[in-house]
Image (spheres, helix red, strand yellow):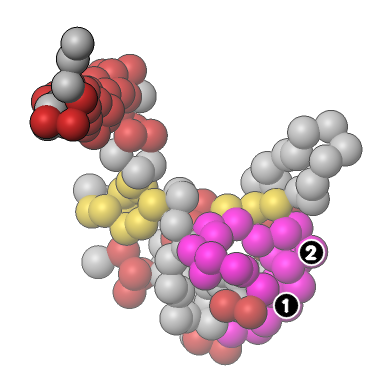
Amino acid sequence: MIDMGNSKPNYRPVVGLALVSLILCGLFFPLLITSIAQIVFPYQANGEIVQLNGRNVGSNLIAQGFNSTELFHARAASQSASRVDPDITLGEAISQVPGISSAVNRSGYGTISSANLTSIVNGNVEGTFWIFGSPYVNVLKLNLILINEYPTVYRNLTA
């Protein structure tokens, strides 16, 4: 006959399994996936960092805080739940065109017509899948195009 009242519970297998799971799932697997991503997709794995004249100026994945009235702006905080959305709808971009054109023309460094700005916006629309979603544009991409195509207007940003 076995006396069950005096035996101690054996936690060793449970603790061992928990530690092995922790090491495999919390350390080994993330390091493996990160290493594979760095080898196969280094640009994306590092946050899609964008450079201008050899300097890091932002990421295609996170909204940038542009202060100049001569550049496109990301969504207002009340329109973006995360406040880091790098894209704006085509309508939002087109609605900013007159203000940007006016600000550039007042700056005295050159002019950019509303037609040219609209053309730049329309040429950089990123699509949607079939009928789902609205067409959008990346704010950082638009601003870098402006800076590169109109260097005299934006000369203070390229120095």
Instruction: Name the quadrant of the C terminus.
Output: bottom left
- Image disc number at residue 98: 1
- Nearest the viewer among 5 and 81 is 5
The reply to whether the magenta stretch includes residue 39 is no
Asked whether the viewer can see residue 92, the reply is yes
- Residue at the bottom extreme of this rendering: 106
Residue pictured at 33% horizontal, 18% vertical: 40
Q: Eyeballing the image, is 75 above or below 3?
A: below
Which residue bears the numbered disc 2?
Answer: 91
Residue pictured at 50% horizontal, 86% vertical: 107
Q: Amino acid at mark 2?
A: Gly
10 Å neighbourhood of mark 1: few (<14), some, or many (≥20)? some
Q: Is residue 128 left or right of residue 65?
A: right
Q: Position of residue 140 (x, y in %)?
A: 49, 57
Q: CA distance from mark 2 to mark 1?
A: 13 Å
Find numbered disc 1 in the image and state the secondary structure of the residue it sits on: helix
10 Å neighbourhood of mark 2: few (<14), some, or many (≥20)? few
The residue range painted magenta reads 79-104
Q: Eyeballing the image, is 155 above or below 50?
A: below
Circle 2/circle 1 CB separation < 8 Å: no
Q: Is residue 65 left or right of residue 130?
A: left
